[in-house]
Image: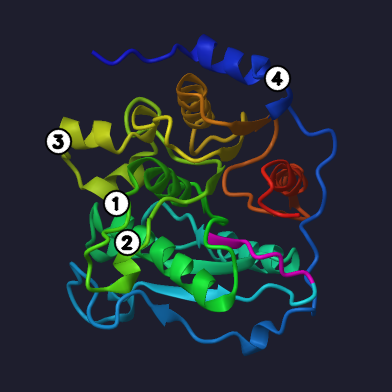
Amino acid sequence: MTLRPTRALLFALACLAGPHVSAAADKAPAAPKKSAAVPYAQIPGPIRLWTGDAPGATGQRPQDIPTLTPFPADPAKRNGATMLILPGGGYGNLAEHEGTGYAEFFARHGITAYVLKYRLGSNGYRHPVMLNDAARALRLLRTFARRDGLDPNRIGVIGSSAGGHLASTLLTLFEPGNPNATDPVERESARPDLGILCYPVISLGEFAHAGSRRNLLGDNPPAELVQKLSTELQVTKNTPPTFIWHTVEDKAVPVENALLFASALRRAGVPFSLHIYELGAHGLGFGRPERPAPPWAEQLLHWFKERKFTP
């Protein structure tokens, strides 16, 4: 039988986890400003994850072809780190502000970024297709890092909402590279070096986001699969260090999701930085003037330096 922390215990974790936890934002900054330093209009077109049809593809429509869109780091600030970005959208669509919006931010801060267009439940796909797309993308980023003179050991993944669930699945169910693979990409490890989870879907049980679970697993998934994809139950000592933020006010994905994952990291001895803010609706990203976000981006940059992910 799996023991599940009570709501009281979960909230106590947020209050007692020490300097890694921020209970609320005193002041929410405006969304990060765009810069003309990186010539985004000249970004190369999307890169297919596989040269032929993707494994499990049901057709050759755009929605059947997973791709990566690169956002080169500002050359004056390039620091060798790379970020894989998994937008949210309930496994039914992909939110632009949690994809391109994040990529431009990272590129301005010297981190080369790639936005993954992964296959979706709304187009008839189910697990493990989404995880296979994310794992292949991570392996490609490691290959690109070696090719481009970046650090193949500083590759992170960020996901929001359902993209946070996909990121947490990659953080917990990653596979090492296959040294005997004929495809050199498959020889690379799919383990991220760190993770960032923004108001993530984590549990597919009591605190699940019903739409994400349905799009990922279908209407009547077996209990074993629900447990396997409840990623708080899959954390081990090998899970990468993770930055997590959520709001108590979130009515779409309960804050317990973030607390469950942080509690599991704590028990496994994995470093983490947890930020629980009182106010803020679901899906904020960096926010907008009429919907400001907490200062999570500033705190993330600080955590990057703590982890020596950036100089």
Secondary structure of the residue carrying numbered label 1: helix
Which residue carries the number 1 mark? 215
Q: Please count the marks in the image.
A: 4
**Could you give the CA–CA distance between mark 1 and mark 2, rounded to whole angstroms?**
7 Å
Q: Residues within 10 Å of mark 3 (few under 14, many from 20)?
A: few
Residue 286 in sight in this render: yes
The numbered dot on residue 18 is 4
Residue nearer the viewer, 129 or 161: 129
Q: Which mark is residue 222?
A: 3
Q: Label 4's element?
A: helix
| Amino acid beneath label 1 | Asn
Q: Main secondary structure of the magenta part?
A: loop
Q: Residue 120 has which mark?
A: 2
Per the model, the C-alpha gap separating discs 2 and 4 is: 38 Å
Secondary structure type for disc 2? loop
Amino acid type at circle 3 is Pro
Mark 4: amino acid: Gly
* Residue at position x 62%, y 29% in the image: 248
Q: Answer yes or no: do the residues labelled 4 and 3 have beta carbons within 8 Å?
A: no
Report the magenta residues as a range: 77-84
* Mark sitting earlier along the chain (2/3): 2
Residue drawn at x 17%, y 72% as measured from the top left? 58
Q: Are marks 2 and 4 in contact (CB under 8 Å)?
A: no
Pick whichever of labels 1 and 2 is earlier in the sequence: 2
Residues at circles 1 and 2 in contact by the CB criterion of under 8 Å: yes
